[in-house]
């Protein structure tokens, strides 16, 4: 019973309050109880005043009690609202901190790409944007207001025991019945069905499509502005319809609720009237008991379920994610220490003198993404000699980026082994290994920080940063202390190609700090063909003492690598130098010739040669 109660989202919400801020939570509860009790105190004070008038007693004390109670009722409400807003903000911060730790804590990234966790991840990530419900600072205030009424109803019922034992019980049972009847009829749990969640995703996507800058150009170019607004409106209307259908009050429970309330209140007020007429209930006590009998009605079904539903959902989502994400993104624990000749900071030099190129050998590697329905690699065998450069080509979905993820140990293979200098990658400390590998992914990181921090987030000597920018063709991009974001007064904007050069500089700076393996996943996709070829030549020069793996669709670039690997159906189907594969006349030759047909002209529109193939 207790374990089931603690598993409820509402219980978890209340449990988070003191974790977010113990002092504010205590003040929140204290103010809540005070506001709930004061209406009953005011009723008692009014009865006291009536009795004093009847018996010609002093009016000072009942008037003071009434005045103080009235002032507190007016003052505590805005104070409680302010405390609720601050506590809600602290809860938001607590949940965001917990989510951030759960997301970045695991050494792998399987938890971020697991479809089974995507629903909770969306709720936990979006709860304070106001799209799926009110933000937390409003939710906490809504919950407070509803609980104040609940406490007020209970306090009134306690006072009503002074009249007779059965009267408060009848009223409490009657008003509590509305919670059960109307909650059941509202089908509150249906607010969290797959259909409602799907509608929320569609509505949020349509909203982001309209307001985010990424789609702005094409929305206007293709005349989709009105279509986007209409789509957003339709999706939001559909979401509201589903939510209303899941929470609307139905006829039969409403009739039963009204009948129960009328009967319960009729019995109590009939008893009060009969007692007053019969002379057994004085006027002052009648005034008190009549007011608290009405006050018991604050227990009635109101907004508490709505408020708790919105406030508890993100809390429960984060609490579910915390234990689920760690194993989903886990990697096997370290089983042996990293020796001085392996990943632990070997031969860190400067000015391109980084030592320690690694040999990588893949044997029988099998891998499929969690929840996926196919194997990306099915017995992959590949050897990459230390200090060599390898280009990886293949159709979309062949596993090129997946290979980079495995080598970065963002995932571990399901079978087979990846060996680095003869040691299974799973036997190396993951953090130490990542000091020896660097990468540029297609979706590379863009930090709203100075250029210096974008090139070396963990810090590096200024000479290494400048040399890395020079090697990436970005020496004159901006001052090292210039912030790369336009949202700041001293910031600047970069083009896609310029950002790509910054990402390349980040990888080249890591080489100067000791990385022995460089992974380049479409590193120059936003550069023109001539620029890409020139940059890659510079990259090969800067990484001549390390092992380099290049993933690219442009054969003008991959031909510069020592060897080229063609992936297909999870295996290596061709491997050799550019000349060897061209002579073979197989898959590589076919793909190369198809791409080369686009460059049959001798010069471009600027009169410059296409001499890149």
Image (cartoon, rainbow, N blue to C red):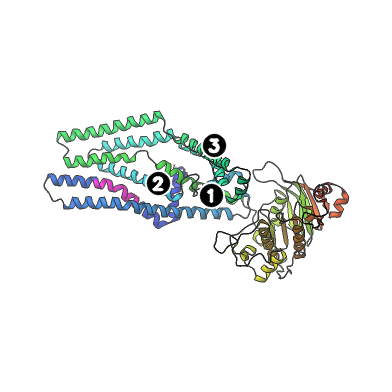
For mark 2, what is the residue?
143
Where 333 sits versus 158, above or below?
A: below
Q: Which mark is residue 580?
A: none
Q: Label 3's element? A: helix
Q: Position of residue 476 (x, y in %)?
A: 67, 66
Percent position of residue 104, x then y: 58, 55
Local secondary structure at mark 1: helix
In primary-sequence order, the first of circles 1 and 3 is 1
- Marks 3 and 2, how far apart in space? 26 Å
Q: Nearer the viewer, residue 338 or 439?
A: 439
- Left or right of residue 582, residue 477 in this image: left
Q: Is 583 above or below relative to 177? A: below
Taking the view exactly as shown, the residue that stands out farthest to the right is 583
The residue that mark 1 highlights is 125
Q: Secondary structure at mark 2?
A: helix
Quadrant of image for the C terminus: bottom right
The reply, left or right, for residue 521 in relation to residue 213 is right
Magenta stretch? 31-42
Question: Measuring 29% from the left and 48% from the top, which residue is drawn there?
Answer: 37
Q: Which residue is mark 3?
A: 195
Question: Which quadrant would residue 219 be assigned to in this image?
Answer: top right
Disc 2 crowd, CA 10 A, few/some/many (<14, 14-19, 20+) = many
* C-alpha separation, residue under disc 2 versus residue under disc 1: 21 Å
């Amino acid at each position: 019973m207790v374990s089931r109660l603690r598993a409820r989202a509402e219980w978890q919400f209340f449990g988070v309050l003191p974790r977010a801020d113990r002092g504010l939570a205590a003040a929140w509860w204290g103010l809540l109880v005070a506001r709930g009790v004061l209406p009953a105190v005011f009723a008692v004070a009014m009865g006291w005043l009536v009795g004093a008038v009847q018996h010609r007693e002093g009016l000072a004390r009942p008037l003071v009690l009434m005045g103080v109670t009235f002032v507190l009722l007016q003052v505590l409400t805005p104070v409680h609202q302010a405390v609720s807003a601050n506590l809600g903000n602290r809860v938001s911060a607590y949940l965001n901190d917990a989510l951030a730790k759960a997301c970045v804590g695991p050494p792998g990234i399987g938890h971020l790409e697991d479809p089974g966790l995507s629903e909770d991840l969306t709720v936990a990530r979006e709860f304070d944007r106001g799209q799926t419900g009110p933000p937390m600072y409003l939710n906490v205030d809504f919950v407070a207001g509803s609980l104040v009424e609940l406490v007020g109803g209970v306090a009134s019922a306690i006072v009503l025991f002074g009249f007779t034992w059965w009267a408060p019980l009848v009223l409490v049972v009657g008003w509590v019945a509305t919670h059960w009847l109307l909650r059941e009829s509202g089908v509150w749990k249906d607010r969290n069905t797959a259909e409602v969640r799907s509608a929320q995703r569609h509505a949020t996507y349509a909203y982001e499509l309209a307001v985010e800058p990424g789609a702005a150009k094409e929305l206007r170019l293709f005349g989709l502005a009105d279509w986007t607004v209409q789509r957003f409106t339709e999706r939001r209307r559909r979401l509201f319809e589903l939510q209303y259908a899941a929470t609307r009050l139905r006829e039969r429970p409403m009739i039963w609720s009204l009948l129960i309330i009328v009967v319960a209140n009729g019995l109590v007020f009939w008893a009060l009237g009969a007692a007053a007429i019969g002379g057994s209930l004085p006027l002052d006590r009648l005034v008190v008991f009549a007011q608290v009998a009405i006050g018991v009605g604050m227990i009635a079904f109101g907004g508490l379920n709505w408020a708790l539903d919105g406030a508890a959902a993100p809390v429960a989502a984060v609490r579910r994610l915390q234990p689920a994400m760690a194993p989903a993104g886990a990697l096997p624990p370290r089983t042996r220490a990293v020796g001085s000749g392996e990943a632990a900071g070997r031969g860190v030099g400067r000015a391109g003198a980084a030592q320690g190129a690694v040999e990588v050998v893949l044997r029988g590697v099998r891998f499929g993404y969690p929840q996926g329905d196919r194997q990306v690699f099915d017995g992959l065998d590949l050897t990459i000699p230390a200090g060599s450069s390898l280009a990886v080509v293949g159709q979309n979905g062949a596993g090129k980026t997946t290979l980079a993820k495995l080598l970065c140990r963002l995932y571990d293979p399901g079978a087979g082994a990846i060996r680095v200098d003869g040691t299974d990658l799973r036997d190396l400390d993951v953090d130490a290994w990542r000091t020896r590998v660097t990468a540029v992914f297609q979706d590379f990181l863009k930090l709203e920080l100075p250029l210096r921090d974008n090139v070396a987030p963990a810090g590096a000597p200024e000479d290494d940063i400048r040399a890395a920018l020079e090697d990436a063709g970005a020496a004159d991009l901006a001052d090292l202390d210039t912030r790369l974001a336009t949202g700041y007064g001293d910031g600047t904007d970069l083009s896609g190609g310029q950002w790509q050069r910054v990402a390349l500089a980040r990888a080249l700076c890591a080489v100067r700090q000791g990385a022995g393996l460089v992974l380049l996943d479409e590193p120059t996709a936003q550069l023109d063909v001539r620029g890409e070829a020139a940059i890659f030549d510079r990259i090969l020069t800067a990484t001549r003492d390390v092992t380099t793996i290049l993933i690219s669709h442009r054969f003008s670039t991959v031909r510069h690598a020592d060897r080229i690997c063609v992936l297909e159906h999870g295996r290596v189907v061709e491997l050799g130098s550019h000349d060897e594969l061209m002579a073979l006349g197989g898959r590589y030759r076919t793909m190369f010739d198809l791409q080369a047909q686009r460059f049959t002209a001798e010069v471009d529109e600027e009169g410059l040669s296409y001499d890149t193939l």
